[in-house]
Image (tube, rainbow, N blue to C red):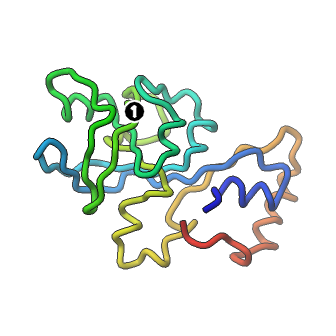
């Protein structure tokens, strides 16, 4: 399935990159035999290109591109591994699916994102996969952020949305 960025770039060459974000869903996870409710933020891989200041302390965005890979916050890493070991490579379970921790994000008090425990790739969104409303959960359930080329005519860009409506939108991911 192609990314939202690829789809939107095909609609306008002025769009350099975009990402979907869904902030702080509540999810139940299990790890090391412990069950806990956590905050879950879902993003596209391109999120880290738009916001390069999110510090990845361990792991990489390349690993995040893999199937069912998640980042955990440093705060949640300490909860998962109270002995100070790395959570990278460990498994956690959400919505009856297993996810592998591919990295740790530095805790940050000065970001646009609310504090979150787990960041999941939108391609493997556990909330969407298990929702009775899954077939209706497409772009409308996410905040979509864009980075456009310098000098972009914003009126022309806004007209792209009015022209396309929902026609030609990619199938739910």
Q: In front: 115, or 123?
A: 123
Q: Residue at x 55, y 50 (%)?
A: 44
Indicate the quadrant where residue 110 lies. Answer: top left
The total of numbered circles placed on residues is 1
Indicate the quadrant where residue 78 lies. Answer: top left
As drawn, 97 above or below 109: below
Where does residue 152 sit, x and y in percent of width and height? Answer: 86, 46
How packed mark 1 is, by other alpha carbons closer than 10 Å (few <14, some 14-19, many 20 or more), is: many
Q: Residue at x 33, y 32 (%)?
A: 88
Q: Give left or right: position of 162 versus 118.
A: right
Q: Give left or right: position of 75 versus 166.
A: left
Q: Give left or right: position of 124 versus 29.
A: right
Indicate the quadrant where residue 149 lies. Answer: top right
Q: Residue at x 39, y 43 (%)?
A: 70
Where does residue 48 sit, x and y in percent of width and height? Answer: 57, 37
As drawn, 137 above or below 114: below
Q: In front: 87, or 12?
A: 87
Q: Residue at x 48, y 33 (%)?
A: 111
The residue to which callout 1 is attached is 103
Q: The C terminus lies in which quarter of the figure?
A: bottom right
* Residue at the limit of the structure toward the left, as seen here: 33
Where does residue 86 sit, x and y in percent of width and height? Answer: 28, 25
Where does residue 30 sit, x and y in percent of width and height? Answer: 18, 50
């Amino acid at each position: 399935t192609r990314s939202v960025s690829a789809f939107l770039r095909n609609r306008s060459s002025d769009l350099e990159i975009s990402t979907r974000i869904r902030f702080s869903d509540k999810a139940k996870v299990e790890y090391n035999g412990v069950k806990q409710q956590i905050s879950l933020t879902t993003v596209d891989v391109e999120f880290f290109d738009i916001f390069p200041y999110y510090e990845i302390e361990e792991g990489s965005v390349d690993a995040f591109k893999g199937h069912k890979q998640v980042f955990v916050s440093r705060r949640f890493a300490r909860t998962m591994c109270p002995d100070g070991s790395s959570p990278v490579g460990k498994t956690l379970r959400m919505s009856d699916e297993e996810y592998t921790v591919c990295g740790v994000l530095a805790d940050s008090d000065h970001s646009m994102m609310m504090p979150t425990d787990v960041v999941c790739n939108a391609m493997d969104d556990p909330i969407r996969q298990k929702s009775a409303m899954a077939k209706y959960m497409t772009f409308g359930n996410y905040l979509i952020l864009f980075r456009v080329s310098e000098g972009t005519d914003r009126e022309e860009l806004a007209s792209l949305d009015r022209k396309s409506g929902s026609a030609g939108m990619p199938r739910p991911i």
